[in-house]
Image: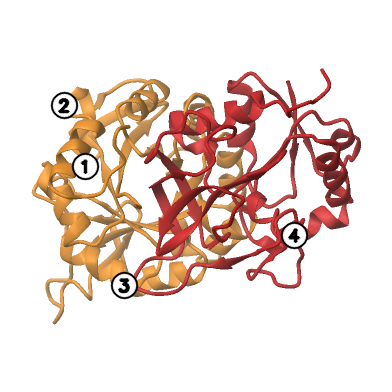
Amino acid sequence: MRVTVIDYKAGNLTSVLKTLKHLGAEPVVTDGDLSLVESAERIVLPGVGHFAATERLDATGLTSAIRAAIARGVPFLGICVGMQWLYAGSTEAPQQPGLGAFAEFCSRFPDGSEKVPHVGWNSLEVRQGLRLLAGVELGEFVYFTHSYKGPVTADTAAVTEYIEPFAAAVERANVMGVQFHPEKSGETGLKILRNFLEWQAKGAAC
Amino acid sequence: MLTKRIIACLDVHAGRVVKGVQFVDLIDAGDPATQAARHAREGADEIVLLDITATHEGRQTLLDTVRRTARELFVPFCVGGGIRTARDAEQVFEAGADKVSINSAALADPNLISAIGSSFGAQAVVVAIDARRDPAAADPVREAQVYAQGGRHPVGRTVVEWAREAEQRGAGEILLTSMDADGTRAGFDCELTAAVSEAVGIPVIASGGAGAVTHFADVFSRGKAHAALAASIFHFGVSTSRSLKEELAQAGIPVRLPC
């Protein structure tokens, strides 16, 4: 299966590409070629770095193309900053809007006795376990590295606790996001990516 | 709950894992890709590959090694040794590393930290610090000194101050090696690790001195470390990360299990 991987020039795609290939997918990368989004079967937006870097998605027209692809029902997975981008925005770069698929804003972990960023393996409490997180047991561990996070809402597919509970995974219809790095999360991460690659929208034409 | 990480460290020379005391009497300990995959399978939370080949020709061998090692590795993978420029780091990332560890090059040019961080994110930059207590100082721990060039030369700065600067310049983690403890197998320098961990807001990885499970429990609790490096105790199948973590769990340390 072909997977369109979005590159907004803020980090290293090697790990994500390698993992998708390992799972039998054929990733194709676009940093502005909209035809690869228009013809996409699956879209992955990996992300590290600063939320402000997502400005490039607007500048290249990728935001509009992704919005249209999502409206067509193309399964979309945002990873880390790629998940945060699905919200209305982030306090990391308040002037930069996100896609707005989820109405809330991402915010920084509060300062206190714990380190920010949140780095390492933390456990998932799965709330919607039928699709992206199918087969993921309570307490399975995944690898995080981030300072900003989305709030827990009805769209939250899994909750993780660090300083406070936050959205470790989010999903609504064909739009999905994970705050952790499934490509770095061992067997659990591979299982989640495989779920994404195999997920079929209900009623989708074959 | 966020768990404490056990990081398996592979010293690599000319494309092979080596084991030795103070980098002498090196024994061949296998193929890096095979060893890294084995550690991941046996429960390591992360893999660090440290290239101790100091030659220019060695760079290409290293990139090949990183590429081969990364191919079947699905846990975080950090590469250190000989990374002197942002371009060096970029090549290592392109070969499949998730993080780079920089040491002497960051001391020589602290801008390297932000140069790598601005392109690849702070989470990708680990600043490694070789530290030695200063026995002549009023407070040997707070005034522990930074050493460069594989621990040969003191640079005239305290560890706490350099760790703070590294954080400010955009390092994502500190890898702190106690040269006093390294090779002794008598335990980590918990006082030094705690002093650095309290001074910075980023995670600190403790290294040097591990010889028993209790040493890991100590450095996670008393030493306030977020992760610990394990090298020699794993070689030749002596112990696995999984068994180490099972014992740590019994001692009340949060670890990733089952793994």
Q: Nearer the viewer, residue B47 or A180?
A: A180
CA separation, marks 4 and 3? Answer: 38 Å
Q: Is residue B212 above or below residue A164?
A: above
The residue shown at (71%, 61%) is A103
Q: Which residue in the protein does label 3 denote?
A: B160
Between circles 4 and 3, the one closer to the viewer is: 4
Q: Chain of mark 3?
A: B
Q: Nearer the viewer, residue A67 or A36?
A: A67
The residue shown at (40%, 64%) is A163
Mark nearer the N terminus (1 vs 2)? 1
Circle 2 packing at 10 Å, graded few (<14), some (14-19), many (20+), is few
Q: Chain of mark 1?
A: B
Q: What amino acid does circle 3 point to?
A: Val
CA separation, marks 4 and 1? Answer: 51 Å
Q: Chain of mark 4?
A: A
Q: Is residue B39 visible?
A: yes
What secondary structure is found at the residue carrying circle 4?
A: loop
CA separation, marks 4 and 2? Answer: 50 Å
| Residue B222 in the figure: left or right of residue B79 | left
Chain B visual colour = orange
Q: Which residue in the protein does label 2 denote?
A: B238
Between circles 4 and 1, the one closer to the viewer is: 4
Chain A visual colour = red
What secondary structure is found at the residue carrying circle 3?
A: helix
Circle 1 packing at 10 Å, graded few (<14), some (14-19), many (20+), is few
Q: Which residue in the protein does label 1 denote?
A: B22
> Do discs 4 and 1 share a chain?
no
Between circles 1 and 3, the one closer to the viewer is: 3
> Do discs 4 and 2 share a chain?
no
The residue shown at (26%, 61%) is B131
